[in-house]
Amino acid sequence: MSEITVIDEIGASADSLWELASAFGDLSWLPSIESCSAEGEGVGSVRTIMAKGSPKPVQERLDAIDPSTRTYTYSFVGESPLPCENYQATVKLVDLGADRCRIEWRGSFEPAGLSEEQLSGIFEAIYRGAIAAYKDKLEKN
């Protein structure tokens, strides 16, 4: 199993970031997303994401969510949009006080068509792109 981790800090409270990040079926804040819809609520719900310029949607299932630790875990369902198997990611927010928080985004996967390094690079770019969008949305200028 391969793993990728991205850790960054955001100039916003953990609560405000959690409000945005934990809305599993709403990715309207993310500029690279054309549309996102969800079926169901809570653990087991599935969101269907159409990224701009992508020929196929991505489906992700919410596997776990814990507001007390500001953590959620999701995985790909159906046909994987990337050449990998058993993809699962966990996002955790840590309150740093004074309107700052840390985001820890960890993914695991088994390569199936690209090298571990290539897939790690793709996932890192996705995570960093989402974190940049969180910063754009929440940080005070």
Image (cartoon, helix red, strand yellow):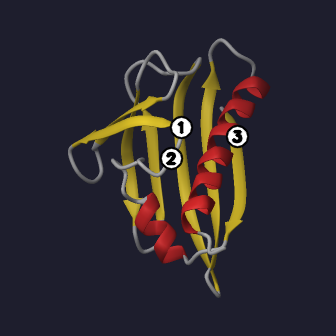
Q: Could you tell me which quadrant the N terminus lies in?
A: top right
Q: Amino acid at mark 2?
A: Leu
Q: Give how far across and how far down residue 32 sits, in percent.
A: 53, 37
Which residue corresponds to the image point at 54% horizontal and 44% vertical from the top-left?
89
**Could you classify mark 1 by the number of other residues whose Cα lies within 10 Å: few (under 14), some (14-19), or many (20 or more)?**
some
Q: Give how far across and how far down residue 82 sits, in percent.
A: 56, 21
Q: Nearer the viewer, residue 26 or 6?
A: 26
Q: How many marks?
A: 3
The residue beneath circle 3 is: 124
The residue beneath circle 1 is: 32
Q: Is residue 15 above or below residue 98?
A: above
Q: Is residue 65 above or below residue 59?
A: below
Q: Is residue 27 above or below residue 47?
A: below
Cα distance between the residues tagged 3 and 2: 16 Å
The residue beneath circle 2 is: 30
**Element on which disc 2 rests:** loop
Which residue corresponds to the image point at 42% horizontal and 74% vertical from the top-left?
68
